[in-house]
Structure formats: structure tokens, C-alpha cells
Image (cartoon, rainbow, N blue to C red):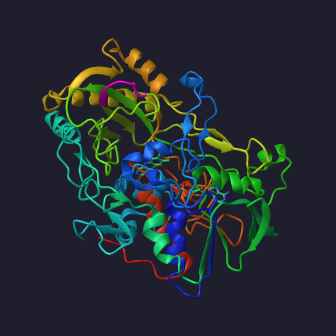
Amino acid sequence: MVGAGSAGCAMASRLTEDAGTDVLLLEAGAPDEKEEIHVPAMFPHLFKSEADWEYYTEPQDDLGGREFYWPRGKTLGGSSSLNAMIYIRGHPHDYDTWADLGNEGWGYEEMLPYFKQAEHFEPGADEFHGAGGPLNVAEPADPHPVSGAMVEAAVETGIERNDDFNGAQQAGAGHYHVTQKDGQRHSTAAAYIRPALDRPNLTAETRAQVTAVRFDGSRAVGVTYEQGGDTHEADADAEVILSAGAVNSPQLLMLSGVGPADHLAEHGIDVVADLPGVGRNLQDHLFAFVVHERTSGPEEPAPSSNIGESGAFTRTSESEPAPDLQYHFAPVYFMDHGLSNPEEGVGFSIGATQLRPESRGRITLDSTDPFDDPAIDPRYLTEERDMEVLVEGVREARDIAAASPLDEYRGEEVWPGEDIQTDAEIREHIRETCHTVYHPVGTCKMGDDDMAVVDDSLSVHGLEGLRVVDASVMPTLVGGNTNAPTIAIAERAAEMISAEQPLPADD
Ligand SMILES: Cc1cc2nc3c(=O)[nH]c(=O)nc-3n(C[C@H](O)[C@H](O)[C@H](O)COP(=O)(O)OP(=O)(O)OC[C@H]3O[C@@H](n4cnc5c(N)ncnc54)[C@H](O)[C@@H]3O)c2cc1C
């Protein structure tokens, strides 16, 4: 298995529950020893650290040529060791869309049992939640008062109160549940791998970067990896599984000869399988912010704070089948990932996100060196509808920020700023300041059309002994954060690989 991130750790742990299955888990990053990984409020300190791949996109022409910074976890636990710990599954509609696209077994009623199987929901099991699973899901331990005030403010604007976005309905405003245990981050390394490390059938190697999948004809027979300056080969008796994430799984496939034949030819790579969809169909969420100075409340959030402590889901129109806007409420300044916050004072931030962007980007090779970054071109906001929804999001975020529960906290509006009022001005502000919500998916999409990379058992089309199991297989981006969905994909994949009966669908 390549990559010990959200999917890789969950799957390696599940597969090795069977003593007859041997797993070699290869992770490019270091062990998850940094303090900032474990203390939730410190996660922004991991940006641009050695636990971060620190990617940059190609210049985005429609956005002033900006090259967007993309953090991605490079350590045991992958991006689950770097993320904001928000536990959101998306909307049932998202999974039913996957099933409608021809992916059998991936509808909401079939996926719900895997979310529950993964979960230990601290408040207790119910029809939507599991208890006893590896991943601890908690209510926020000590949220900042302004996070509660933002929820009250949203309610005053007419948004329903919702205490469980993963329950009977997603729409509404409330506090997020978090993947934390005893006030510390519960990454997939903590939840799944650490408890499994003494199994004799699991070998986990860190600082081991896979550089190629090796093939015998159309069968994947192993991988080549570099560790400590040496090149190693590992053979796979059963199969090779890529869980390197939405950037690196397609990169590794292309480096190994699996991808669009014309693109591989440009780089002189021999074609093992011509799969034009590898690296295509890239989808990501964007944040457009309303940020205020904050005049009261504790200066710092609690150490257990996940920063995006509360939020809301709304629809731009009643005809939308599911909420198409999500808000993240933060009790601090969060400008440019927190990297460009004002030096003085404190703030609060409301990030508006369009949940189902229509723009599609791509990941391609820049070179044949596996240690070079691939070219990431999300083509953000190339579809007009995406900008329209974000403008509505900024307007709704402003309404929330103006509501009376925030009176005691609200200082001057820093972003967009009082002089930015017309649609044209808000659009320009979004172009200049929007940034990723860190949810790239779709670059090895599941399906049976010409652009699909894996089938609904997550096996790569046209090849044997090779699967992709991570966020890249999502055919469409879910309406919410992507960690829990990726873990549920891994839970389901582990069961398919073990050839066990699927869990019964949840009615
Ligand atoms: C800053 C940030 C905040 C986020 N906040 C949230 C949130 O609050 N809630 C939420 O639900 N989601 C959040 N996400 C998104 C979520 O964490 C990801 O969607 C999810 O972790 C993706 O899982 P994955 O298994 O596809 O990839 P990853 O978890 O990224 O795992 C890929 C792993 O593969 C390794 N790897 C890559 N290439 C190689 C190679 N060649 N050889 C060996 N190993 C390799 C990587 O180092 C990494 O460990 C956030 C993400 C980030 C970056």
C-alpha cells in the first residue's frame, strides 16, 4: 500500500485484522511526532513545515495569475494529521449521485453503515451514528464564545439551528463535530494504525517514497521506493493499492505508464495502459471570506480548538436538491490560511464555500522525476456559476456577521471591507483573496465511462492487481469536508479486498 493517509491507515488496519493478510504500508513522510499535529489549535503551524508537501498550483488566469498554496499532509496520518478535524460526511444526495453514475453499492443507504462502522461517536450511537469504531468523533471540548455567537447570528438571519450536520438533515447552523479524543487530534494514524502496529502481519515504513508501480504485462507486481537514499523493490503477491491522495495517486500512475497516452508520450514514458482520465476531473472547494476585527472574548481559542469550530449549510435556492453553500466560522483571523493575518489585534472569520463547483481542473506531469511536483491546475472559477454562488455566499456571510448576537464582538470589517459593495467589487475581492478549503478529489474517478480510472470495486480499468483507494476516486465532490468520506471509502474498500459480504444497507 502506498500512502499512510486518511484512506491508507484505515485500510491497512482493517486488512490486517485478518492474520492471513500481510500488508506493507509505505509512507513518504516522517512519523507523526510533531507536537503541532496533536494539539488541535496548532494545526496552522504545520503549514509549510516538513509535514506538508507544500504544493502550489499553476497560475490561475481568471484569478489574477495567482499560484494557490495547497497544503497536503506528508507524515503518518497524511492530511488527517494536518487537517482542521471537522467531521462531516456530506449529503445523502452526494452518494446517490455516485450510484446514479453507475457505481453500484456507493449510494447513501449503502455507505451509511461504513460511516457508522468507522465511528466512535462520543454522545452515543443512534440511527445515524456508530459507537465502538476506531475513529473518535467528539463534540467540541471548549469552543470560543464567538463561535457560539456566530451560530446564534446565523439563526437570527433565518437559518435553522442544527446540532448534528451528519444526522437527519444537513441544513442549518451549529457547532461542528470533531475527530478528536481527549482534546487531542484523532488522525487515522492515531485511530487506526497505532493500535495495529504490533500485528506481525503489518509493516509500516516511513520516509519511504514510492517512485513507480512495477508491471508484468498488465498486472501490477510491486513498487519501487526510495528510503534513506537507497532504492528498494517490494513485490506484491496479491495487489498494489495506491492511497497517495488526489495529487500523488494520479502522479504515480502517470509516472508508471498509466494515464493519457499522448501526455505520457510527451514525457517519453512507455504506456502500460492508456487511461485518459488519470489526473483529470480535479474538483476542489474554495473559501471566500468575510473577516472582522473582534472587540471582545478570549484572545486565543482553547488548545483543543479546531479553529473552524462552528458553521452552517444553506441553499441558494429552494430548488437545490441539497445545501450548496457551507460556512466555516472561526474565532480568529484566518486570512490566506492564517499566513497573512494582521499583526495586531484579534478577529473572527466566516468562510463561505460553494459545495458543488462546476469547474474542473487537472493534474499532469511536469517532469519524469518522481521527486518533482506535478503540475496542479484546478482551473478555479472557470465556470460562471461557481463565482455566482460564492458572491451569494459572501452576501449571506455578511448578513450573519451583521446580526445582533455578534454586536458585542463585531469590530470593523476587514474583508471584503466596507467600500466593497457591488457584485463586481465582491467578485474582484473573491478573485484576489479566495483560497482552497483543502478538498481536492476526483483525479482517479470511479465509474465506467471513458474518463473513469477505477471501476466500482476501485480496481484500475484494464489492469490487474492495482487499485486506487483515496479521495481521488470520488467521481464528484461531496457537499462537505472530505476526511470522513475518504475514511468511509477505505472501510468499504477493505471489505471488498477481503472479499467479505458487504454490510447490509441502512434504511
Ligand atoms: C489543511 C487541511 C485542512 C483540512 N481540513 C479538513 C477538515 O477539517 N475536515 C475534513 O473532513 N477534511 C479536511 N481536509 C481534507 C482531508 O483531510 C482530506 O480530504 C483527506 O485527508 C484525504 O485523504 P487521502 O487518503 O485521500 O490523502 P492523504 O490523507 O493526503 O494521504 C496521502 C498519503 O500518501 C502519502 N504519499 C503521497 N505520495 C506518496 C508516495 N509516492 N510514496 C509514499 N507515500 C506517499 C502522503 O504523504 C500522505 O501521507 C483538510 C485537508 C488539509 C490539507
With 395 as the anchor, is 216 left or right in this view? right
Considering only vertical position in the picture, is 462 above or below 413?
below
Q: Is residue 342 magenta?
A: yes
Considering only vertical position in the picture, is 90 above or below 221?
above
Counting labels gives 0
With 400 as the anchor, is 137 left or right in this view? right
Q: Quadrant of the C terminus?
A: bottom left
Considering only vertical position in the picture, is 375 above or below 495?
above
Q: Residue at x 50, y 57 (%)?
A: 101
With 474 as the anchor, is 61 left or right in this view? right
With 430 as the anchor, is 496 left or right in this view? right
In this picture, which residue range is highlighted in magenta? 341-347
Residue 429 % position (x, y): 43, 20
Residue 364 % position (x, y): 70, 43
**Near-viewer residue (53 or 444):** 53
Q: Is residue 495 magenta?
A: no
Q: Quadrant of the N terminus?
A: bottom right
**Near-viewer residue (225 or 325):** 225
**Near-viewer residue (111 or 93):** 111
Dominant secondary-structure state across the stretch colored magenta:
loop
Q: Is residue 171 visible?
A: yes
Q: Is residue 450 visible?
A: no
Which residue reaches farthest top?
Answer: 419
Q: Residue at x 29, y 46 (%)?
A: 309
